[in-house]
């Protein structure tokens, strides 16, 4: 049986993760009628960093689709992260 799961709260997963992680945080805004535009706001990113303090954090001046908007920077950042894995 396949279940459709929603993951609105990643708290437990972030606390338990023991693998190397990197959070890429792009530009975002909050529309007065529609709410958050982007994957996460600054408070969300700060909370993720609190829950997983070993996580690498990179703030990137880009639209939400970093891989599309800043392809070279995205690839460079991922390659740098991978090169530092032990």
Image (spheres, grey):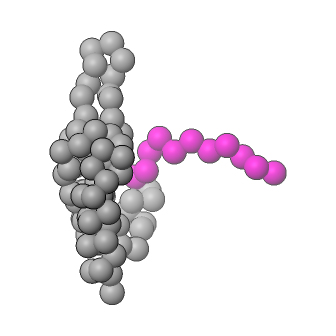
For this orientation, the residue located farthest to the top is: 33
The x, y position of residue 54, in whole percent, is 26, 69
Magenta span: 1-11
For this orientation, the residue located farthest to the front is: 72
Residue 23 picture quarter: bottom left
- Give the answer, above or below, for where 67 lies relative to 8: below
- Give the answer, above or below, for where 24 lies relative to 63: below
Left or right side of 7 for 38? left
- Give the answer, above or below, for where 48 lies relative to 22: above
Q: Residue at x 30, y 44 (%)?
A: 69
Residue 80 in sight from this viewpoint: yes
Q: Residue at x 38, y 62 (%)?
A: 15
Most common secondary structure along the magenta stretch: loop
The x, y position of residue 7, in whole percent, is 51, 45
Left or right side of 19 for 30? left
* Numbered-mark total: 0
The x, y position of residue 83, in whole percent, is 30, 80
Decide which of 70, 34 is in the foreground and name it: 70
Left or right side of 86 for 10? right
Asked if residue 40 is among those painted magenta in the image, a careful observer would answer: no
- Give the answer, above or below, for where 2 lies relative to 76: above
Residue 50 picture quarter: bottom left
The x, y position of residue 32, in whole percent, is 27, 14
Q: Residue at x 18, y 45 (%)?
A: 61
Asked if residue 6 is among those painted magenta in the image, a careful observer would answer: yes
Decide which of 77, 10 is in the foreground and name it: 77
Residue 31 picture quarter: top left
Q: Quadrant of the C terminus?
A: bottom left
Residue 47 in sight from this viewpoint: no
Q: Residue at x 31, y 71 (%)?
A: 79
For this orientation, the residue located farthest to the right is: 1
């Amino acid at each position: 049986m396949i279940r459709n799961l929603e993951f609105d709260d990643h708290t437990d997963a972030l606390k338990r993760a023991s693998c190397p992680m990197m959070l890429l945080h792009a530009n975002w805004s909050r529309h007065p009628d529609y709410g958050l535009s982007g994957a996460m706001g600054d408070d969300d990113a700060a909370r993720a960093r609190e829950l997983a303090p070993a996580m690498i954090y990179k703030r990137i001046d880009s639209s939400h689709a970093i891989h599309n908007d800043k392809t070279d920077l995205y690839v460079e950042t991922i390659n740098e992260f991978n090169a530092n894995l032990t």
